[in-house]
Structure formats: C-alpha cells, structure tokens
Image (cartoon, helix red, strand yellow):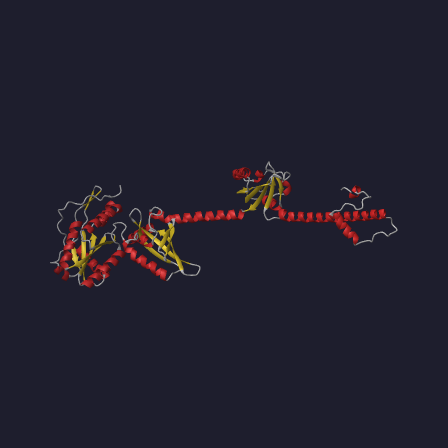
Amino acid sequence: MTNRMDDWNHDDPEPPTSDLRRRAESRLATEEPLPGDDVPEPAKRLIHELRVHQIELELQNEELRCTQEALERSRTRYFDLYDLAPVGYLTLNEAGLIQEVNLAAARLLDDSREALIDTPLTQVIVPDDQDIYYHFRHQLGSAGEPQSCELRLRRAEARPVWVRLEAGLVPATASDTPPYRIVLIDIDARKRSEQELSEAQSRLHLVAEIGELTFWEWDPNTEEVFFAPEWWRQTGYALGELPLRLKEWARLLHPEDRERILDHLSRFVETPKTLSEIQYRLRCKDGGYRWFMARLTALPTADGPLERVLLVHQDVTQSKLSADQAVHLAQHDHLTGLPSRALLDQLANHMLASARRSGGGLAVLFCDLDRFKAVNDTHGHLVGDHLLRAVARRLRAAFREEDLVARLGGDEFIVVLANIGDAADAALAARNAIEVLTPAYRLDGLELHCLSSIGISLFPQDGQTIEELIRRADLALYQAKRISPGGYHFSTEDSTRGAGGRILSAPPRSTRTPEPPDPAGPPR
C-alpha cells in the first residue's frame, strides 16, 4: 500500500484528504488533545499526521476483518446452498470430466466426492441411456440455452437410479470456471411409480381384453354418451360413426329389450343406486345381435347431484350361448337330443294345465322296443346307440309339432299328445307310430328289426297328474308286451272300447321304403 505520507510535502499547509482520512480525523478529534503550545508547529503537524495515519491503518484493519468475516459467512452460505442442497450439483469441464460435486450428487452416485473428481460423467451413465446424454450435450452446446433430460445413473453398490439432468453454460467471461453446471434431481420414485402404473394399466387392459370389458358414460342432463375405444372395437363400428346420443344407442337395442332397458335407465336416474346391472342385445356393425351386460354406477358432482352414469360393459354372448347350451344339455338326452325326464315333466305339466283350462283331452303314450336287448347283446352297445338315435328320429317325425316326444332312458320313450279328442285319436296316433317304427333299420350294412309296443293313458279319465298318467301308461305297456308285442294297449277297458275295440297285435308292415342308413353309423 502506498504511504500517503511520502506524497505529502511537509511545507504544504494541508495534507491530501480522502474518505479514510476524514474518518480518521473524525476519530482523532474524539481522542487525545493536540500537543501544547510549547511544541513547535511543524512538530505538531507531524505528530498529527502520524496519529491520523495510525488511525487509518486501524480503520483499514477493521474493514479487512469485516470483509474476511463476510467472506467466511459467504463461504458458509455457499456450503449450505451447494454442498448441503437437496439436489445434486456437478460442474464439468470441456472434456466432460467432473470438477466439482456436492454431497447430494455423491449420495446419488453412491460414491465419495474424491473418487468422482476427474471422472467422466459418461462413466456413471447406464449404457442404454448414453445416446440421451450425447443428444443432451449437443443441444446444450448448439442452442446455448439451458437443457434437460431424464436418464439412469449407475451406482457402485446399488441399482441404477433415475435422475433429471438440468444444465446450463457458464458465461464466457468466467474463464476460470468449468463451462458446464449440472443439476441432478432424483426422480427414481416418480419413474418407478410411472412404471408400476404402466404395468398396472397393461394388466388392466389385458384383463379387460380377456374379459371383453369396456365402459361408456351417459349424461342424463344432456343425453350425450361417450364410448371408450374398446366399445367401438367390440361392436365393429368405426370411431365416431354413430351420433353420441342415448336415443341413437337405443336404436341399436333388440326390439324385445329396448323398452325394458330405457325404463331401467330412467328409474336408475330417479333413484341412483350404488350398483345396478342390465343385460341386453345390441345390433353390431355386421347386423347381428350380441349379448352385453352392463353394470351401472352413479357419478355425482362434488355437490352431490347426479352428473353422469358410468356403465361398465361386457360382451357376454359366448357365456350366454354356453349357458343356453348347458341348459339344453341338462334338459335333453345326450344320445337322441330328445327332452329328458326333467324337461318332460316341465313341458308336460304345461300341456296338462292348458288341457285343464280348455277342457280338452290329453294322451300319454309309453313306447318300448321289444327286441332292443337282443340287438345290444348281438352287435354291441355302440350299434344299440345308433339304433336308438334312428328310433328317436322316426318317432319325432311320426307326431305333430305340438306333441311332446321324450326319452326316459334305455329303450323307453314317452309321447304326450296335445288336444286329443277321444281314445280313437290316441289309437290312430299309436298305430301310426308303430307303422313308422316297424320297418327294418339299415345301419352300416346291418339290417335290424325291432318291434315297438305302446301303452296309452288318457287325461282326465286315467289320472290328474303327469306322474300318474305315465304310471298308468307304463302298466298298459306291460299288458301290450305281455299279450301281443308290437301293438298298443289302453290303460282301461273303457278307453279300449272307445277306440273301436282291443287292438293288441302289431299292424301290417308298412310298404314304405325303409329309411336310409344312419349317417353317423356305428363305429368301425
């Protein structure tokens, strides 16, 4: 520091002044008094200048100390802001080597700060993400503006971590500072949540696809509807092909379902439930109808009133067909396709109730094959099964559409005749059945003869229930087989006389050409 005393000519009346001198002069004035009159004037001025100079040095020392304290506080704040920051900070040189790294960045990289210094940043980036970083560096250099990217960093003893890099260039005037400053933000939790959400959505989409699930929404206030993309795919319509109004959707409903479904929707809006379910048929793009099931859920506004209705929609066509098929299989004989005993009871009771209401008659014919056991014993059960199928086809063809033909089991069949006037009508039907069943059965080169005997009971004279009528017809069948196989017999003598006399023997063979062989034929 230049000593201003050297620049002062002691012969000058006043030394040069400055802010520092003025402050020193001000402090000196409050301290010691000036030397007495016995001190020569030049000496007084010299002593005064020495004291001022001393005070100036003291003031400069105080300022230096304050500056040092401020610098220390600044260094402490820098440490707090840089080293203790919750995000990672890096500075890189032109070669991409790490020059500075804070504690958060060291923790992210799972390594010490000392070990990271002069390490290429590319060395800690996952190989698959290197291209992201190179593009990021290129954009940073070419655009000259802050850039950001997301990538994964490798760590010494842990799995890679997702981070967001935000970087900017240091101004060119700061020549001694590394040119790149990078902020590392830990986004690992967010990325993993996004991945879990994406996987959950993929699984949900797969479940929806397998279960043929989708959804649509209806706004009862505007009558507008919104269909999810999967809805359009299920129905075959192009996206946006249909007007998005409820009445347009309702036109696609099967005529038998339309009124019921619209009424259900109206009632749901009036008294929204937590969950409601409807099933309906909808016309698809190909013109066919498919079965859908929809579960309705009310979506209220924040204030409470109903805003929209969410309908989770599932294509149940296959399950509906499977259910119908299951019911059919449960109610029909698997060998002949005729109604089984369960369906026989159900349908016959309906026919009996109708006969009671109308005052009409009804007849039950119990049919049995007289030589069926011999066929089974001689040719085997598979041939016997084919014979039963052929008998069922002939029997079904021998009666009217409104008559019921069923198989009880084995070689026993039941026929319920509706709207029978008297015993003569029942006898005529029995004779026709025997005539149809009598011709030989040609099955895969075999010519099989199998006579049929029939027992007949009449409603109301022989019983009031189907069970009773079947039992009486069974007894009549026993009499027919015992007295004259291949004929028919009524349950009572009165019925026999009403039919024109006892007819027990088999009628003459039909001159019709025997039916062609069973297309299925017995297995070879």
Question: In x, y percent, where is residue 478?
Answer: 20, 57
Q: Is residue 341 left or right of residue 440?
A: right
Picture quadrant of residue 502: bottom left
Q: How many marks?
A: 0
Picture quadrant of residue 342: bottom left
Judging depth in this view, the residue of 417 and 321 nearest the camera is 321
Q: Is residue 164 left or right of residue 341?
A: right
Q: What residue lies at 30% left-to-right and 58% top-to-bottom? A: 260
Question: In x, y percent, where is residue 49?
Answer: 81, 47
Is 303 drawn above or below residue 236 in the view shown? below
Picture quadrant of residue 30: bottom right
Q: Is residue 504 left or right of residue 81?
A: left
Q: What residue lies at 12% left-to-right and 60% top-to-bottom? A: 498
Question: In x, y percent, where is residue 325?
Answer: 30, 51
Q: Quadrant of the C terminus?
A: top left
Q: Residue furthest top?
A: 95
Judging depth in this view, the residue of 128 and 306 nearest the camera is 306
Question: In x, y percent, where is residue 385?
Answer: 25, 47
Q: Quadrant of the N terminus?
A: top right
Judging depth in this view, the residue of 17 and 259 nearest the camera is 17
Is 251 drawn above or below residue 133 in the view shown? below
**Residue 243 visible somewhere in the drawing:** yes
Q: Residue furthest left?
A: 500
**Residue 377 visible somewhere in the drawing:** no
